[in-house]
Image (spheres, rainbow, N blue to C red):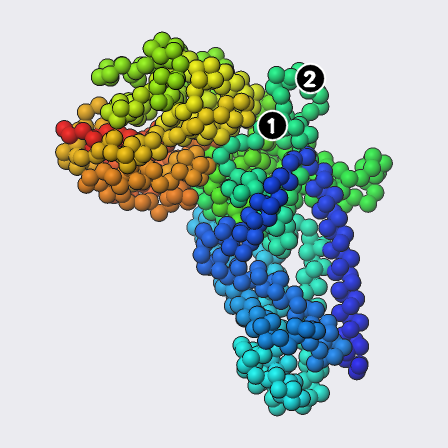
Amino acid sequence: MNALQIVAVVVCFAVTLTGIALLVKTVNHFLATFRLGQPEMRTDARGARAVTLVREFLGHTRMSRLPVVAVAHWFTMVSFGVLFFTLINAFGQLFQPEFALPLIGHFFLYEWVTDVFAFGGFISILVLMAIRQQNHPRSAAGEGGRRSRFYGSSFWQAYYVELTILGVTLCIGVLRGLEWTLARQLGTGQDTALHFPLTGWIGNAFLGLDTATVTNLIVIVAAVKILISFAWMITIALQPTMGVAWHRFLAFFNIFFKRHADGRTSLGPLQPISVKGEPINFEEIEELDEDAALGVGKVEDFTWKGLLDFTTCTECGRCQSQCPAWNTDKPLSPKLLIMALRDHAHAKSPWLLASEEVRESGEGLSDRTKAAAAVGSLVGATGYAADAPLTAYNPHGPDAVIDQDVLWSCTTCGACVEQCPVDIEHVDEIVDMRRYQVLIESAFPSELGGLFKNLEKNANPWGMAPRMRLDWAKDLPFPVRIVGQDVEDLSEVDYLFWVGCAGALEDRAKKTTRAVAELLDTAGVSFAVLGDGEACTGDSARRAGNEFLFQMLAQQNVEMLNEVGATKIVVTCAHCFNTLKNEYPQVGGTYEVVHHTQLLNRLVREKRLVPVARPDEASSVGAASTAEKVTYHDPCYLGRHNNVYAPPRELIGSLPGVTLTEMPRHGEKSFCCGAGGARMWMEEKLGTRINLNRTEEALATGADRIAVGCPFCKVMISDGLTGKQADGSAREDVEVVDVAQMLLAAVRRS
């Protein structure tokens, strides 16, 4: 070994040992921090979880929403693992420049894989760097470039990771070129395209050098490669909140431990409120410990999976780019929320792990840790300014980590969860914080007080008398049977028609209810309703954080449904659909629940309903309404939460003379109407109105009808349309209609 090699070996091994030691320390910190979280069962069906992990990892199924990014990220990700062997080889080259890994070092398939992924990784990281610059906040719309999905992300961390990957792939390319040159000079016969398929040409640049110089260059480049790699390790070990780097390790665990072992997105049902990992039995609520946390009031009240979620965040901003609150200039960004909780959790964890003596003395605790420990509440007033949304997030206090306006801006639409490439469960974590605010702090928007009171007193959000639940059926040309009056139980009919609060009490939604009833009658499908025996499903109460009220309503409804023998239920409200189908099994009510668009589509396919009339021939009597050009708005709780996208579109496609024009944001990227998460009952005081944003997009298609599949959506978009018609920016003949109303018009001729 010459002097150069000795220096390279000493420096590289010193840096390597330092990096490994720091990495082990940080991994132990992670494990200790995650153990601070509340217990949660996520280890069932391990085989299915492993299959999901492999599918998402190799197939990049969660990344496919942005195809170019997905391909580039796939090469970058796989090259990280595949090219690890070149790092091992580099250590050998410090001692012996012509070193090659035993068995595989000169095996042509290994060399081909190395060349392909070295080049693929190099090109891919350049693509990702270009995309980051293309989407940089400096060139994005909005205050301070807030329309960029990278707004608020840590740019120095991203640049460091990108340059590290770029540097490593460059070193591999140069090393491969030098290895080709050395092979030619030594006459090994390996300087061929079989062994250097993509990198041999690089060696031409070194042919004029003597062998000693080439070997010295190999040592230098190998050392640079090692130093870049372990400098990165040291950096991320010192930065446990560097999600843009740590996600390449933690994402595997976060995907494996996602809510559904089969890989379904963590949407649909909310999880029951739990204490120490056990769901609360609300019949024994009086026996609960006084200090039990109902929901999340402190960062350690999150489950261990929640803490893992926060730490895994890559800061890619896909959730932010899709969030209806953020896109209408409200302070909520799912990304910034997760980042703030991550930074707060890791700042506070040393204090939580310390003994009482250390806590009191503060010895060995950083100022940041002391500040995080002194924060009184996760949610409160941060004093943020509308033109500086980052001030709504203060991971280290002093007053609160997250402003209350952040928490209450959420519509629980699920766009963040659906977009997240590493399966973070934002909605569950937001609702858990709402639960604490409602049940423990009694701190919630004033409008929700009226909602809760109406639900408690009259079992509907409007507070209207239960006897009015049958007003929608007046003057129908056939009798609507009521369970307990006209039929003894539901075994006498095909379906229970769950009308829902909006469908029974809101004038615009009543048209949908009447249309569905008429279509079912026409198709010969027998049904009955509960009438004044029906109560609100509790969707809004639960998503507002009032779990007690939800449980009361749910248990009341389940008792009624089980008593009358309900097995098959059809609903028109996407929120009722989700609650009955996905959440009532948690309280003992398991039923076959279908959305009206699913059932009607089935009836059309079976020829029990036959659309025959073109728009100019169709009936416009009563609830019926149609037109030639239509656009369809996907309800969040039908689409993203339950993956029902095709039936409404197939129904529209079956209508003669009707053309469907999709909005730019449709399907899984559909933009929320603004009513979910109990926002239907709260005033929208911040930013611009979500429903207006969506209405403008629908009107831009030039459609004559905006079709929906949910009464909440119908109310919100109708209000938006009325506003646009009032200011003259929308035609007076445009209407918001349910898909059922269009089908009814086509089934009848005028």
Amino acid identity at mark 1: Ile
Q: From the viewer's perspective, is 44 left or right of 574?
A: right
Q: Nearer the viewer, residue 351 or 199?
A: 199
Q: Nearer the viewer, residue 655 or 702?
A: 655
Q: Residue placed at 73% from the left, 74% from the top?
A: 92
Residue that mark 2 sits on: 287
Give the answer, above or below, for where 434 lies relative to 171.
above
Q: Position of residue 141 (x, y in %)?
A: 43, 50
Mark 1: give few (<14), some (14-19) or many (20+) Cα within 10 Å: many
Q: SS at mark 1?
A: loop
Mark 2: give few (<14), some (14-19) or many (20+) Cα within 10 Å: few
Q: Residue placed at 74% from the left, 43% from the top?
A: 32
Confirm whether residue 398 shows in the render: no
Disc on res. 273:
1
Q: Residue placed at 44% from the left, 17% from the top?
A: 565
Q: Residue placed at 51% from the left, 42% from the top?
A: 264
Q: From the viewer's perspective, is 200 left or right of 574?
A: right
Q: Position of residue 395 (x, y in %)?
A: 64, 41
Q: Residue furthest front?
A: 491
Q: From the viewer's perspective, is 61 left or right of 248?
A: left
Q: CA distance from mark 1 to mark 2?
A: 16 Å
Give the answer, above or below, for where 57 lies relative to 497.
below
Q: Quadrant of the C terminus?
A: top left
Kindly indicate the quadrant of the structure image that contains residue 518.
top left
Q: Nearer the viewer, residue 608 or 55?
A: 608
Q: SS at mark 2?
A: helix
Q: Quadrant of the N terminus?
A: bottom right
